[in-house]
Image (tube, grey):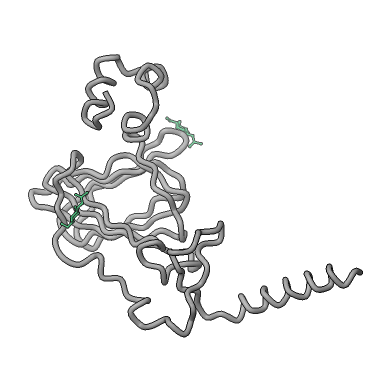
């Protein structure tokens, strides 16, 4: 074995054993993110506050087109989650507000904190599983399934979610079709919606 490859293997083992010895790796979002997450913040600068997220405090404005406000405590907003394989979110709903159909790479649990919500998901056999949830009820959405929530109560609603991934992603079906760069004629063909409907929805997102 050349001394160069010996040195390479030795440094690889040294860095792996170093990684195993770490209690945690608070991310440094100012550095580029790799597939395994962010590089660790210098541990001598880590404080208790790094492990606390206060972004869920207070009232959230629910004035967007869906009548919702989604606050994501993913690892870029809450760097202590880096590498731990968990994330959280707070969902706020106006009366009648919705979280439109979307999916993540991970599974998700939801707990209702205020109000009354119909939550559901649709499996790959097009079977919908949905139920009206009340305060303190919990439901799980298996990974990658399309799912949604609707505030069906007479008051604003709030729920908290947790996802079992550091970078679960969030893909919203309607915006992915109509808010991005997909041409309207392609959107018509792949959804069977009429030209008028596609134009109406694209206008909502300012893309027609
Ligand atoms: C969510 O609520 C916060 C606090 O009211 C507000 O600053 C923010 O603009 C809201 N986001 C959306 C998308 O409405
Ligand atoms: C798929 O859904 C149909 C009804 O739409 C049902 O008859 C069938 O058993 C389902 N298949 C599976 C594998 O769940």
Q: Quadrant of residue 207?
A: top left
Q: Position of residue 129 (x, y in %)?
A: 35, 43
Quick one: which residue is furthest to the left in this view?
A: 154
The answer to whether 30 is drawn above or below residue 147 in the figure is below
Q: Residue at x 26, y 59 (%)?
A: 90
- Which quadrant is home to the N terminus? bottom right
Q: Is residue 155 left or right of residue 126?
A: left
Q: Residue at x 48, y 81 (%)?
A: 43
Give 186 or 192, whichever is nearer the viewer: 186
Q: Quadrant of residue 184?
A: top left
The answer to whether 90 is drawn above or below residue 100 in the figure is below
Q: Residue at x 35, y 63 (%)?
A: 77
Give 48 or 144, whichever is nearer the viewer: 48
Quick one: which residue is furthest to the right in this view?
A: 1
Quick one: which residue is furthest to the bottom in this view?
A: 44
Q: Residue at x 25, y 26 (%)?
A: 201
Q: Quadrant of residue 52?
A: bottom left
Q: Is residue 51 left or right of residue 157?
A: right
Figure label count: 0
Q: Position of residue 146 (x, y in %)?
A: 39, 41
The answer to whether 9 is drawn above or below residue 126 in the figure is below
Q: Position of residue 17 (x, y in %)?
A: 67, 78
The answer to whether 119 is drawn above or below residue 127 in the figure is below
- Which quadrant is home to the C terminus? top left
Q: Position of residue 199 (x, y in %)?
A: 26, 20
């Amino acid at each position: 074995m050349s001394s160069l490859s010996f040195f390479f293997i030795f440094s690889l083992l040294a860095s792996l054993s170093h990684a195993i010895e770490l209690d945690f790796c608070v991310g440094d979002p100012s550095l580029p993110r790799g597939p395994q997450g962010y590089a660790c913040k210098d541990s001598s600068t880590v404080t208790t506050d790094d492990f606390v997220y206060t972004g869920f405090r207070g009232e959230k404005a629910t004035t967007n087109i869906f009548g919702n406000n989604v606050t994501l405590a993913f690892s870029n907003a809450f760097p202590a989650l880096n590498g731990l394989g968990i994330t959280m979110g707070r969902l706020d709903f106006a009366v009648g507000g919705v979280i439109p159909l979307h999916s993540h790479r991970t599974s998700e649990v939801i707990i209702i904190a205020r109000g009354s919500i119909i939550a559901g998901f649709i499996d790959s056999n097009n079977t919908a599983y949905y139920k009206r949830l009340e305060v303190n009820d919990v439901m799980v959405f298996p990974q990658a399934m399309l799912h949604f929530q609707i505030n069906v109560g007479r008051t604003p609603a709030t729920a908290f979610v947790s996802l079992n991934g550091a970078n679960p992603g969030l893909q919203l079906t309607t915006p992915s079709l109509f808010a991005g760069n997909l041409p309207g004629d392609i959107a018509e063909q792949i959804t069977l919606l009429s030209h008028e409907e596609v134009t109406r929805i694209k206008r909502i997102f300012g893309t027609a």
